[in-house]
Image: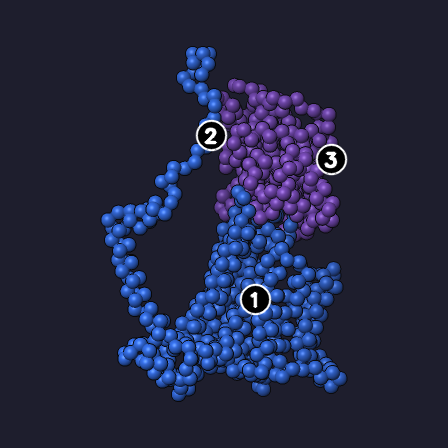
Chain colours: A blue, B purple
Amino acid sequence: MSDTHAQSTAFVRETMLPAKPAPVTQTGAVRWLRENLFSGPVNTALTLIGLFFVYTLVTHFYPWFRHSVWNANSMAECRAAITASFGDGATGACWAMIRERWHQFIFGFYPPELYWRPIAVFVLLFVALAPVLFTHLPRILLCFSVVYPLVAIWLLWGGSIWPVTMVAVGFVLGWLMLRLLSGVGSILAIVAAVVVPVLFWVFAVGPLDDALTSVLPLAIEPVASDRFGGFLLAITIGVGGIVMSLPLGVILALGRQSNMFLIKTFSVIFIEFIRGVPLITLLFVASLLLNYFLPPGTNFDIILRVMILVTLFAAAYIAEVIRGGLAALPRGQYEAADALGLDYWKAQRLIILPQALKISIPGIVSTFIGMFKDTTLVTFVGLFDPLKGIPDFIRADFNWKGIYWEPFIFVGTIFFILNFSMSRYSMYLERKLKRDHR
Amino acid sequence: MTEPHFERDIDRSHMQVSDEIAIQINKMNKWYGQFHVLRDIDLTVNRGERIVIAGPSGSGKSTLIRCINRLEEHQSGQIIVDGTELTSDLKNIDKVRSEVGMVFQHFNLFPHLTILENCTLAPIWVRKVPKKEAEETAMHFLEKVKIPEQAHKYPGMLSGGQQQRVAIARSLCMKPRIMLFDEPTSALDPEMIKEVLDTMIELAEEGMTMLCVTHEMGFAQAVANRVIFMDQGQIVEQNNPHDFFHNPQSDRTKLFLSQILGH
């Protein structure tokens, strides 16, 4: 410190202190143990009780797993094998059932010679999802993602290729209407984009289909909906529901925030009604009531009906999750978008929704996971879900009568793997979209 | 009374006020529910004018400039901006908004977009400017506010003063004819206020029509050609800065000035 400073000021810092590394006691395993498990008498006691609890669970279940039998043709053979190896009274898991019947858990009653079709659909699902989930992949791949749903429907249910093509043509017509008429008037364009495809599907598809089939009968073997079951059914309904419920949920959330009275009221009533009713009620509506409202003789596929109601159910929840995200955005974001002259839709698409959806990711993924697990409820409308429908069917076989835990563990594990992946992906996405202080 | 001052030479060569009217407000009233926020506001702003609006908090000064680009709706009277009257017609509102730039107290940058994307978004989507051209314009204005090197960062990584300068650049990218500033320096640390004010002075030197709600009386003294004092939703006094600060007429103005400049 110089003399001049010493006379006029009490203290002047002339060199800034460099940062030092943290003390060693702040790191290391011992430190962690002491801090987290044994920081005081109460915590030490709780740790010991916890350890005892884990020990009891493991010693209880471990023998059952250790006595697993993989080769047997019936429950009786399983029991005999366990008794032979481990003595009287020993219990064990009979995984032989899974080994014999795994294909029913996965495919239900889908014809075995056609298993390649659902497998192809499943593999292509990842091809279609990749560009959506990982934005650094080339954008051209999105073209496949767009046509994938129709390809998947055709491969799964089979039959002539023409009806599916007609559906696609309808969408293209709608898109053309939107493009051609948007210059004339935006409302006219939207109306035309809805009406023209519907008219096309109602009136033109029948004759066109007949004509095209007579010229070029391109078809693969059809598979009826009652042959679907197990994870094929759960994933079909789950993925369909996820893909359709997100856009619907966004529209409902915006509708609920809208200034227009009718749109707002409709959205509120829809969301509150769907959230107020158990999913099983909606599934019964799908299986029983819906047919009363349709013209007699229409055969509206049961899986499609269930998928639509599961979608509506999930959409109501997603709408509320996204409303939370919209509410979390500062008012200034709306004002800045307005002040720059962006209209409502551009402001929503470019400014509001990207941020609101990002905030809502954990909630949206929770809803998806919940919905995917809820697909097992389709057992109540007579479909063969993997958790109850298929195991009950297998237990009805005299050979596997009395098997109980194994199907639950097997199916539970697969559900866990699928849902855990969704959860991890959502965390990856949150990290990737983090924008501050990087 | 201490005199407000600003340590900078100001080039007044382009600061000419033309006869052309940029904003005309006639007998404008606004209520929030039962609360009468703005009462019979009459204001004419000529092109090239630099107006500072001062007043105690709650006097309606922010509400007034927010009415000019219809972030707030007025209930009676007329607001005509650049020859377009603001009514509930959405086309007119969007037209006015794309001609009028606005800078907010809390910057309101879009945190999910880079600085460059913040600046090019409106030109691309509202003005339909090709992306490359919009980026060139954006870089031009970012250089003008002296932060071109931050173009590819996100707003969350910038300091408050830098963010506010980006917000000014973002507005300028729309090539507005009028700029509104709503307390642009109130949320900033003292060290950063100067860099934002410098940017605003440069804009004034180029002849931009500016309406600025601020407590920076030094800025008002140096740049404004008119200071408007508001209280309780009314314009209490307006004058050129010299007379406004040296010879205030109303008691309310005198009290306000003594409180804001007295220490």
The residues tagged by marks 3 and 1 sit, at their Cα atoms, a distance apart of: 56 Å
Q: Residues within 10 Å of mark 3 (few under 14, many from 20)?
A: few
The residue that label 1 is drawn on is A243
Q: Chain of mark 3?
A: B
- The amino acid sitting under disc 1 is Val
Residue A11 position in % (x across, y down)? 42, 19
- The amino acid sitting under disc 2 is Pro
- Answer yes or no: are tags 1 and 2 on the same subunit: yes
The residues tagged by marks 2 and 3 sit, at their Cα atoms, a distance apart of: 61 Å
Which element type, helix, strand or loop, lies under badge 3?
loop
- Give the mark toward the camera: 3 or 1: 1
The residue that label 2 is drawn on is A18
Q: Residues within 10 Å of mark 1 (few under 14, many from 20)?
A: few
Residue displayed at 68% across by 37% down: B141
Q: Chain of mark 1?
A: A
Q: From what the image shows, is residue A356 above or below residue B149? A: below
B41 or B240, which is in the foreground? B240
| Label whose residue precedes the other's in the sequence (1 or 2) | 2
The residue that label 3 is drawn on is B20
B56 or B212, which is in the foreground? B212
A274 or A395, which is in the foreground? A395
